[in-house]
Amino acid sequence: MCGKGIRKAIWRWIYPVLLYEILSFLAAFVTISIPGIRENDLSLAGILINALLIVPIFGYLYIQDCRRPERLLRRQFNSPLKVYGLIWIIAGSAVLAIVGNIVISLSPLVEWSSRFQETQEAVFSGSFRMQILASVLAAPILEEFLVRGLLYQRMRDVMGVRTAVVFSAAFFGILHGNLVQGVYAFFMGIYFAWLMERFQNIKIPILGHMAANLAVLLLLC
């Protein structure tokens, strides 16, 4: 790939992240400006508003990417997913998330990350309804469109599968902003990228991500 092609590829990775950061800042401002939101629900409400702002844009970009010839070619080799396959994905994602959380809870990582404890308090101090709406529904859709729908697929076009899996998983870990969730998200990101690669449909990693977050929420409640 020539220098111009490399710069274009890098820009295609960077601008969704910049857009995410800008709109996330806007969502935070909008959230604190809305009257009637309980203080304990502010962080979760911010996730919901963030998703409402960003998902339509990222969904449009994802659809446009899916029309590229190389993406159409990949999808031709994927067989339809059966109902029992969906059940396995839901169950497997939930079990993997629970095992990952148990392993991390037994490690010293939790003690090393005060930011993680602050994040946990912000999430679990909110109402259960808001936790479901934000953590189980909105966050997986938002994060999967950004990381697997756009970044992983665009990296894969240039880097190949293995490198794109690792780089997108690393970004997914960094996106969570603290050591504990970063390590957990890195390994889950590898799994979600595998789902994206295997089925070439953003709905599958979204479903797996939702199942994983729901399992963790029920585990820690």
Image (cartoon, rainbow, N blue to C red):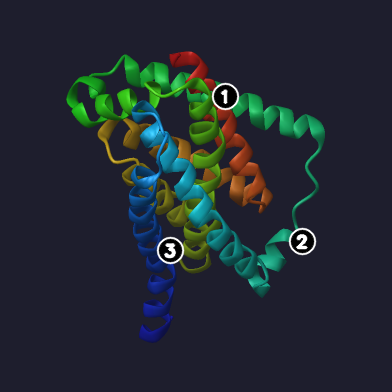
Would you identify the image quadrant in which residue 45 lies?
top left
Quarter of the image for the C terminus: give it. top left
Using the numbered discs, state the Cα–Cα distance from disc 3 to disc 2 in whole angstroms: 27 Å
Using the numbered discs, state the Cα–Cα distance from disc 1 to disc 2 in whole angstroms: 29 Å
**Residue 113 makes an appearance in the image:** no
Tag nearer the camera, 1 or 3:
3
Residue at 57% of width from left, 58% of height from top?
56
Q: Secondary structure at mark 3?
A: helix
- Residue pointed to by mark 2: 76
Q: Say above or below: 100 vs 28.
A: above
| Observer-nearest of 122 and 148 | 122
- Residue pointed to by mark 3: 16
Tag nearer the camera, 1 or 2:
1
Amino acid at pointer 1: Ala
Amino acid at pointer 2: Gln
Estimate the x, y position of residue 46 in percent, counting from the top left. 41, 42
- Residue pointed to by mark 1: 94
Q: Secondary structure at mark 1?
A: helix
Q: Secondary structure at mark 2?
A: loop
Residue at 50% of width from left, 21% of height from top?
128
Residue at 55% of width from left, 36% of height from top?
209
* For marks 1 and 2 on the same chain, the one whose residue lies earlier in the sequence: 2
